[in-house]
Image (cartoon, coloured by chain):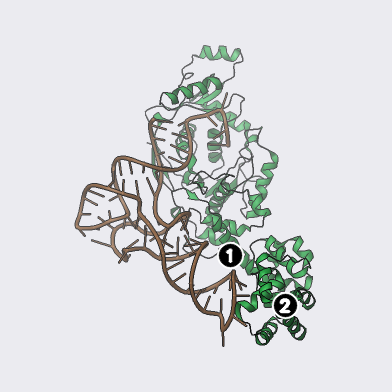
Amino acid sequence: MASFTMTARPFKTRFAPSPTGLLHLGNIRTALFNFLLARQAQGTFLLRLEDTDALRGHEKYARALEQDLRWLGLAWNEGPEAGGQHGPYAQSERGSIYKEYFAALESRGLAYPCFCSEHELAIARKTALAAHRPPRYSGKCRALLPQEVQARFARAEPATLRFRVEEGKTVEFEDKVRGWQVFSTDDIGDYVIRRSDGTPAFFFCNAIDDALMEVTLVVRGEDHLTNTPRQILLLQALGLPLPDYAHIALVVGADGAPLSKRSGSKSVQELRASGFLPLAINNYLARLGHTYDANALMSLNALAENFGLSRLGRAPARYDETQLMHWQHEAVLHLPSESLWTWMGEAVHTLVPMEKREEFTAAVRANISFPADALRWAQIVFTDQLVVSHAAREAMTTAGQEFFATARQALEKHGADFKAVSETLRQTRAVSGKALFQPLRAALMGELDGPEMAKLLPLIGVERARKRLSI
RNA sequence: GCUCCCAUCGUCUAGUGGCCCAGGACGCUGGCCUCUCACGCCGGUAACAGGGGUUCGAAUCCCCUUGGGAGCGCCA
């Protein structure tokens, strides 16, 4: 019966992505949970690059991913750039370390060379599936005689290294979100730990590194749950410490299928480019498949303080953009005005006069979710190119020429005092409510909805307003 | 095919045998903001997958069915 849990070692979580593409929401959620847990325990959040597949592990993705994590505020305190006692933190640089462990395993007969070709294995897998049997490795090379192994090596036949999984045993461990797990080794075939090109395979280096880097809690996707016994077996064979494991449910798209670009999952870079705020993403993700008592927007620290593995749902969670939008709106509402201004971007900065910044941001804040929205209002308020929507046009036509003539007079008299202007109009033209405000809004802004006119009119200015009321 | 995980409003979820003819949030929707829309505030809408047990009592425990997800790779 197997063992588990570490004690007394400093709390450490990790995020171990493969830099083969851009980070998306599913990845980040895993990173976030690990980060939150580490921060809560005042432990260490480690970043490790799983780039053993030399062909696909691009330096540029590694950098992009580091940049994404930093942007989100998920800074790691051990790993690339941050340093630490257990480096290097890119698996591509850990070859010599893995070599030792391969040798240890081989010398004790716990791993053996396998000469089966990929083609051969593919066929075996297909055959097994067709015969309704599990597509597991047959064990063909398991009992090769030493002489034969020598001979085949002498002939330079390529070989992988397989970890020997003893049959008839059980592996048990307590998953921190799913509870006690029991697996039979009969359901696990001998598996490849070193590819024929000499590079280490995922199951191997991932487990070894968690142990060597003294990770105490592995929070990862549920897709790794049934693979965990293999890693435990390996670690036990090597006498390495086992981390705790917590397998979180995966995020699925609206169709219930795993999250993909098709189902609307965007990369962090895309989200960032369109103006999503880190706090919005973090608040949304921390509540996707996890629950907090409070419904208000929380800082990263608050998210960490109140995070808990026991508050995690176990069913796959559905990605829902409307909820992300809600947190985005909340985040915009709570952004300090200086940050709000910066966030609006260059295009807005060039349109809005320096001295109008405060007024402008205060006026539009509640009505925008993205810099593009801010830009739209900046254009409406500070430029002469006014695009009048169809609905707005109709509202203006309905109000008629005289309405606007009066409006112009009121404007001359009261200036940009919207309240006074509208009041005058109400009295002299005997219109009120919708009939009063909609045509004004339509002419002034080209739209039927938006921020308060009383706040925008002073920014638009009397001159521009006059022109817009001249129809 | 085998093994494993999972199943409460449209969505994210609370709920660990009685406090639940099920609570919150998003969405949708009604009202209010002594005159528009939006913002905001206050209400409303809507769910325990199905069937068997166990129990005085089940959303909560057990079994089966159904449905979803994962793994079984020289991918990570």
User: Circle 1 marks a residue in which chain?
Assistant: A
In the displayed structure, A350 sits above or below A65; it is below
Looking at the picture, tell me which residue is in the foreground, B13 or A154: B13
Question: Which residue: 54% across, 33% down?
Answer: A204
Question: Which of the image's four quarters has the C terminus of chain A?
Answer: bottom right
On the question of residue A82 being in view, the answer is no
Marks 1 and 2 share the same chain: yes
- Specify the colour of chain A: green
In the displayed structure, B42 sits above or below A27; it is below
Question: Which of the image's four quarters has the N terminus of chain A?
Answer: top left
Circle 1/circle 2 CB separation < 8 Å: no
SS of the residue at dot 2?
Answer: helix
> What amino acid type should be assigned to the residue bearing mark 2?
Gln
In the displayed structure, A62 sits above or below A383; it is above
SS of the residue at dot 1?
Answer: helix
- Specify the colour of chain B: brown
Label 1 or label 2, whichever lies nearer to me, is 2
Answer with the quarter of the image where residue A441 lies: bottom right
- Residue A351 image offset from top left, x and y in percent: 78, 66
- Residue A191 image offset from top left, x and y in percent: 50, 28
Q: Mark 2 points at which residue?
A: A401
